[in-house]
Amino acid sequence: FNPPRLPVGGGTSLGAALRELTVQIDTQVRKTTHEAKGDWKPVVYLLTDGRPTDDTTAEVKRWKDHYASKVNLIAVGLGPSADLNTLRQLTENVMLFTESQEGDFTRIIKWITASVTAHSRSVGDDKQPELSQTEYIVRLAKDEPVKAYDENCVTLTGRCSKTRRPYLMKYERPPARISGLDFSLNLNSFNIAGCYPIDEDYFAWSDATATGLQVNTSELHGVPGCPHCGNASAFALCSCGKLL
């Protein structure tokens, strides 16, 4: 078995994703005619971990007007930064997944597989099967405030000064627990979590829209090594403001 190579990119182009989804539905799902029976109502799983970085207004309206009644759409928000309000405009089946321990993402994939099986067994029925939330890893999404970004993580792109190949640096905010209190205090600092090599197609898959978000370098602790040439430091700031 050769697992597929999945491209990675920045941004959450939900509008473009909906547009592509409707194209695939129009071209792949066979409609019932006088000569032949069409396909069953398709089941679509939408997984997103952020807030849309493109305009979704037109595509959401188009989906609600022409596709919502023809598709079983299950939207799964991954983590606290998922825009649940937008997902609720697309479907009533909005779930929230918050990874808390190793293996949770594997469990949600198994949950999706079981859910697809349940939908497949109920084809032709008017009533959709109820989604089981017995697994602690996935639950019905509640009304929670949406954030435009993940306040506990900083991701930066850089290039190797020798090979000119790109990489990602990830910093995470460590939670601070105070003895006797039942909440965590987030400090204004981020610790290095890792530095990962990427390909040029990362930028092709990324949303080019500038977010305007900034972080003070004094809040970033730890300097990773370059994953391409092995240099001890992969964090250097050019006079133009870009990372080297």
Image (tube, rainbow, N blue to C red):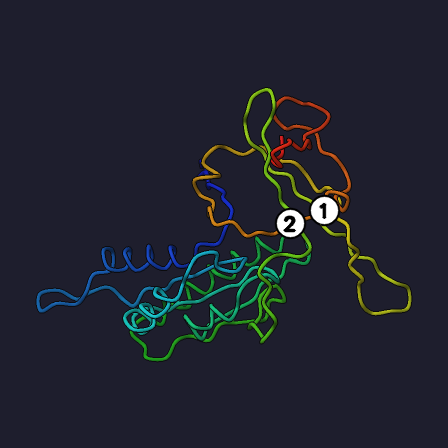
Q: Amino acid at mark 1?
A: Asn
65 in relation to 190, above or below: below
Residue 162, position as x, y percentages in the image: 60, 20
Which quadrant is the C terminus positioned in? top right
Crowding at label 2, few (<14), some or many (≥20) Cα neighbours within 10 Å?
few
Q: Amino acid at mark 2?
A: Gln
Residue 22, position as x, y percentages in the image: 30, 60
- Give the residue pinned by disc 2: 214
89 in relation to 100, above or below: below
Q: Nearer the viewer, residue 156 or 218?
A: 218
Residue 216's mark?
1
Q: Quadrant location of residue 120? A: bottom left
Crowding at label 1, few (<14), some or many (≥20) Cα neighbours within 10 Å?
few
Seen as rendered, the residue at the extreme bottom is 127
Q: Secondary structure at mark 2?
A: loop
Q: Secondary structure at mark 1?
A: loop
Residue 72, position as x, y percentages in the image: 37, 69
Residue 113, position as x, y percentages in the image: 46, 59
